[in-house]
Image (cartoon, rainbow, N blue to C red):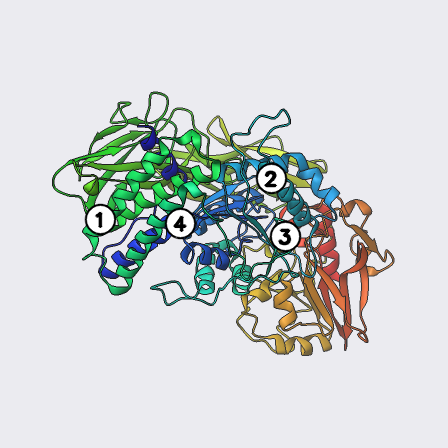
């Protein structure tokens, strides 16, 4: 019984991918399971945030070496941008977590979140330590190492820093080194043996100074794609980062060894990992190697089905030997225990693959409330013999947890085609709403697992197959402001998404009833579970509201169902000057800010072409990161527009996109994560940008979010430019570059302006208004 529980615990920790049916799919599944079974390797990938991991290297380690992958992240990436839509930090974090789950599942691995705050940029490690206390970070990393027991750790680079090491990455690297050494301590200070001690075989750090490269241009067995191509494909899971992820994953990272300290460098990053088997396991290791050679030979000859009886017989014999050794659990060191459990789990899945077990099922709901009913139906179990005893087992069913068919018995006979009624627990940790739900969970959502158990007299014909389904827990109704902060000004709008997670129909109206103002949404009807509606409320503000920031409740009937923020401040704007904006769409932050300011503007089509005088416009704005869309096809006409007296105002762009074809000659960018939101602003206070139509003060630069600027600017020698704003980041870095040309001018704004405008920051509004009037 104990051995069965150990096996179930292992299977619960790592997801099991279902196999397919055709001859090639059958061969590939058997090969893949055999590769994992003999590998013995667990790889822990550690990255600052989702999307930063080296997916090509992880593809090699998974599909070339058979390693189990744990994909861990320090933060949820909430300081970043969503390339699909404008979202607040909470929604971005939820999106990133879901994408990390998909990417990890594609690697047949698991995601893990440490859930430290994503503060954005940091000037030094002291700044980082204020958000990530070193002892807490080290303790969480040690716990992660001791629970996952990796043979190899990969520390991913900071993708937002070029030409150096960002302070947040330096702090993480230091904490990881201490955690690795602390986890390896076998005894406590009192001399007692630590039961969870674990010595990592090797720690690899992605570094420009590294010399070790993974063989990413090779191809896995029975696959026409290279590991690099596979990694790029998995990277598409990160849809919210689609402008950056492809560039990040196409290159090859070099690695250096951080642990252990050794003078001898291996030829490849993973050479000699995992280490040699203990003498007590070497005989069993030879048996595993023999089984793997048999599986590999059969797969290459297309004889997997023909050799099935012999493979199963040999496999079960090895499993029996492993069970005998596991009965002496206490006599093995931690590394040997891990090896035995790895083999046991891998052989169980290899047996499923050889037998050809494949489970098709239908689940009614994947989002549940507390104590809500859903159903699971097993539609078919391919490879299931007609005789023997077959049961379905739900390990999470119990008196205080899930209910199965209104009872607490977790194991019942399998009836293919019949529905099993599941009722969710009474106490749940919410994953929704996306703005804040699930932010402190180590995994995305909840993994609901069940096993198909088949028993016959012969162990060769018995098996258990695990199936995992990701679930999310939610309240009955979620009201999510898609514009979580608004400006207290005429014609302001509040956009909300309302979702019904219950089985009850709703006929309601969303309202604002507050001393600050009122609004009435349209009546909405949500007749079924997970039905949703997006409602736009026109806000009517009361007069004489003082300058300040307010929290405003949202009502349905008499109940408060949510809140949104509202700011009141003064800003002057040139409302006559005609302005065009090349943007990703009318929902962009800049476009919405123009509307809030009352700017006379129109949206230009990035795919279109326009003459030197585009419709009487005096200023054209290129929105943040819009060059990364690859759709601005009218660059040749900007020069003529500027020389005739126009102003081309370019908001911050991605460094690598800009450098391939810079719009301003002699201006180059390099991405950085070291210009934090408190970076000093050095201004030419006599310059017109600081005086008209708003007089900017020092307070206008306070309370910025995440970073002051995403790039560092370098000006080539011999270029005539003006820099009315500089940033003090160790050395002085241009914050604004003005290049006179003919009767007009080019302006590049090297500031993280979009996040501040999204946050309705008064100083950012006044600064943008001055730029538009310049």
- Which quadrant of the figure contains the C terminus? bottom right
- List the residue tagged with mark 4: 108
- In this view, the residue in front, 451 or 646, is 451
In the image, residue 322 lies at what x, y percent?
A: 33, 39
Q: Disc 2 and disc 4: Cα gap in Å?
A: 25 Å
- List the residue tagged with mark 3: 262
Q: What element carries label 1?
A: helix
- List the residue tagged with mark 2: 116
- In this view, the residue in front, 612 or 355, is 355
Q: How crowded is mark 3: few (under 14 residues within 10 Å), some or many (20 or more)?
A: few
Q: Disc 2 and disc 3: Cα gap in Å?
A: 32 Å
Q: Disc 1 and disc 2: Cα gap in Å?
A: 44 Å
Q: Disc 4 and disc 3: Cα gap in Å?
A: 32 Å
Counting residues from the start of the chain, the first of labels 2 and 3 encountered is: 2
Counting residues from the start of the chain, the first of labels 2 and 4 encountered is: 4
- List the residue tagged with mark 1: 355
Residue at figure coordinates x 77%, y 47% from the top left: 700
Report the residue that reaches farthest toward the right. 686
- Which quadrant of the figure contains the N terminus? top left
From the viewer's perspective, tell me whether residue 461 is left or right of residue 119: left
Disc 4 vs disc 3: Cβ atoms closer than 8 Å? no
Q: How crowded is mark 2: few (under 14 residues within 10 Å), some or many (20 or more)?
A: many
Disc 3 vs disc 1: Cβ atoms closer than 8 Å? no
Foreground: disc 1 or disc 2: 1
Answer above or below: position of 384 versus 303.
above
């Amino acid at each position: 019984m104990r051995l069965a529980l150990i096996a179930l615990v292992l299977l619960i920790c790592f997801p099991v991918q279902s196999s397919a049916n055709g001859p090639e799919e059958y061969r590939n599944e058997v090969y893949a399971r055999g590769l994992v079974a003999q590998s013995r390797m667990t790889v822990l990938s550690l990255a600052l945030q989702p999307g930063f991991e080296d997916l090509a290297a992880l593809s090699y380690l998974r599909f070339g070496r058979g390693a189990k992958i744990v994909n861990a992240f320090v933060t949820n990436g909430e300081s970043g941008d969503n390339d699909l839509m404008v979202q607040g930090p909470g929604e971005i974090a939820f999106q990133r977590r879901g994408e990390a789950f998909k990417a990890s599942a594609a690697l047949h691995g698991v995601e893990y979140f440490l859930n430290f705050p994503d503060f954005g940029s940091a000037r030094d490690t002291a700044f980082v330590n204020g958000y990530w206390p070193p002892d807490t970070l080290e303790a969480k990393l040690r716990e992660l190492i001791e629970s996952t027991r990796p043979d190899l750790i990969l520390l991913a680079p900071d993708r937002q820093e070029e030409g150096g090491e960002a302070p947040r990455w330096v702090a993480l690297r230091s904490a990881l080194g201490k955690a690795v050494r602390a986890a390896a301590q076998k005894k406590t200070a009192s001399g007692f043996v630590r039961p969870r001690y674990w010595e990592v075989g090797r720690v690899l750090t992605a570094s420009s100074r590294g010399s070790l490269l993974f063989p990413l241009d090779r191809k896995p067995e029975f696959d026409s794609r290279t590991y690099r191509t596979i990694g790029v494909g998995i990277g598409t899971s990160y849809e919210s980062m689609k402008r950056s992820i492809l560039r990040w994953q196409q290159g090859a990272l070099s690695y250096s060894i951080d642990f252990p300290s050794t003078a001898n460098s291996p030829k490849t990053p993973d050479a000699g990992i995992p280490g040699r088997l203990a003498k007590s396991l070497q005989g069993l290791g030879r048996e595993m190697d023999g089984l793997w050679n048999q599986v590999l030979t059969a797969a290459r000859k297309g004889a997997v089905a023909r050799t099935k009886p012999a493979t199963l017989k040999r496999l079960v014999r090895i499993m029996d030997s492993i069970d005998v050794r596991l009965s002496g659990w206490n006599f093995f060191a931690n590394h040997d225990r891990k090896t035995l459990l790895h083999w046991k789990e891998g052989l169980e899945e290899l047996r499923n693959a050889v037998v050809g077990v494949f489970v098709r099922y239908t689940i009614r709901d994947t989002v549940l409330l507390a104590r809500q009913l859903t159903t699971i139906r097993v539609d078919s179990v391919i490879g299931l013999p007609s005789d023997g005893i077959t049961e379905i087992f739900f390990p999470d069913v119990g008196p205080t947890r899930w209910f199965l068919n209104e009872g607490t018995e977790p194991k019942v006979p399998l009836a293919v085609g019949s529905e099993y009624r599941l009722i969710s627990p009474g106490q749940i940790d919410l994953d929704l709403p996306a703005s804040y739900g699930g932010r402190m969970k180590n995994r995305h959502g909840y993994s609901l697992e069940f096993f198909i158990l088949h028993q016959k007299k012969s162990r060769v014909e018995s098996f258990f197959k695990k199936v995992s389904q990701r679930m999310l827990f939610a309240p009955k109704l979620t009201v999510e402001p898609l514009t979580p902060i608004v400006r207290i000004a005429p014609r302001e709008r509040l956009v909300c998404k309302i979702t019904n997670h219950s089985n009850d129909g709703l006929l309601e109206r969303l309202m604002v009833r507050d001393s600050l103002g009122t609004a009435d949404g349209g009546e909405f009807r949500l007749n079924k579970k997970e039905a949703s509606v997006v409602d736009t409320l026109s806000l009517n503000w009361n007069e004489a509201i003082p300058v300040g920031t307010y929290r405003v409740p949202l009502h349905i009937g008499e109940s408060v169902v949510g809140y949104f923020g509202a700011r009141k401040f003064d800003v002057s704007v040139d409302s006559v000057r005609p302005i065009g904006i090349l943007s990703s769409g009318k929902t962009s932050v800049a476009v919405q800010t123009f509307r809030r300011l009352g700017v006379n503007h129109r949206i230009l089509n990035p795919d279109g072409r326009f003459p030197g005088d585009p419709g009487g416009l005096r200023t054209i704005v290129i929105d943040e990161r819009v060059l990364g869309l690859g759709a601005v096809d009218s660059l040749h006409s900007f020069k003529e527009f500027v020389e005739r007296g126009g102003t081309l105002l370019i908001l911050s762009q991605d460094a690598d996109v800009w450098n391939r074809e810079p719009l301003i000659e002699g201006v180059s960018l390099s991405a950085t994560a070291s210009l934090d939101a408190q970076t000093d602003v050095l201004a030419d206070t006599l310059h017109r940008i600081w005086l008209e139509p708003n007089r900017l003060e020092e307070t206008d630069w306070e309370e910025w979010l995440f970073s002051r600027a995403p790039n560092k600017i370098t000006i080539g020698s011999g270029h005539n430019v003006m820099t009315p704003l500089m940033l003090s980041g160790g050395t002085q870095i241009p914050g604004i570059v003005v290049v006179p040309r003919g009767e007009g001018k080019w302006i590049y704004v090297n500031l993280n302006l979009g996040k501040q405008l999204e946050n309705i920051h008064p100083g950012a509004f006044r600064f943008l208004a001055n730029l538009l009037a310049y």
